[in-house]
Amino acid sequence: MKKLVLLAFALGLVGITSISMHQIGVSPVVQAKTEETLILEVACDGRTGALNRVNPNATTAARGDVGIVNGAIYPEGTIPPGFDDAFDLDTASGRIGTWVCLNSRLALGPPRGSAVTYYFALPDFETAGLVTQGFNSHRREGSIPVNYALVGGTGEFGGASGEVREEVIGTNKTGAFNLRYVIEIKKKTGK
């Protein structure tokens, strides 16, 4: 009898909670709706790379080495795929923004590697910017597409959240990678 009373009480609480949550606009299972999908391509500019080593005398990567590199952002379809170092970001037209990568090396083992934060300024952070975080897999051979968290935005993208898919699509004349990003913006509460 005691178990039956407790069961009835528990079911009653579940029912009351469900009704209350529904009345205030909260659903027990909420699936975010994609508001916007952006597909961007980035040509990393190898000339802007800087590395701060944990051991300044080291000649190989060590866990905790920190680097930064910039790149140029283009609309989807601008950068042809290929690891031939052919794409020239100095002469390519259609640039729509600046990309910045901060990374900490050897955060995870292969095929992942660096813990990264990417900044997308479209065209600048005051107008429209996105910030992502995750673990990359940049290699000439053996790169795998990876997902990152879209952790925020500025300007037109203020309040943005969602998920970002990154794929290495080749290399450019600076010797650095070309990347494609599919950005699924789930929520935007900005301007």
Image (tube, grey):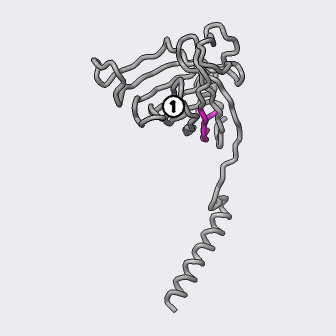
Circle 1: residue type: Ser
Q: Is residue 15 above or below residue 84?
A: below
Residue 178 place in picture, x, y as percent: 59, 21
Given residues 87 and 52, the one toward you in this image is: 87
Going by the picture, which residue comes out furthest to the bottom?
Answer: 1
Seen at 53% across and 14% down, the residue is: 175
- Residue located beneath label 1 in the image: 137
Towards the viewer: 50 or 19: 50
The image shows residue 1 at horizontal and vertical percentages of: 52, 92
Can you give x and y, in whole percent of width and height, for residue 174 in the image?
Answer: 54, 11
**Residue in view at x 63 percent, y 68 percent:** 18
Res 4 → quadrant: bottom right
Q: Quadrant of residue 166?
A: top right
SS for tag 1? loop
Closer to the camera in the image, 159 or 166 = 166
Camera-nearest residue between 9 and 183? 183
Q: Is residue 185 left or right of residue 58?
A: right
Residue 2, given in percent of the width and then of the height, sits at 49, 89
Classify 32 as above or below 37: below
Q: Quadrant of residue 71?
A: top right
Q: Residue at x 51, y 35 (%)?
A: 133
Range covered by the magenta-colored residues: 157-166
Could you classify mark 1 by the number of other residues whose Cα lies within 10 Å: few (under 14), some (14-19), or many (20 or more)? many
151 inside magenta stretch: no
What residue is drawn where x is 51% and y is 86%?
3
Prevailing secondary structure class for the magenta stretch in the rendered image:
strand
Residue 168 sits above or below residue 146 on the image: above
Q: How many numbered discs sit on the rendered protein?
A: 1
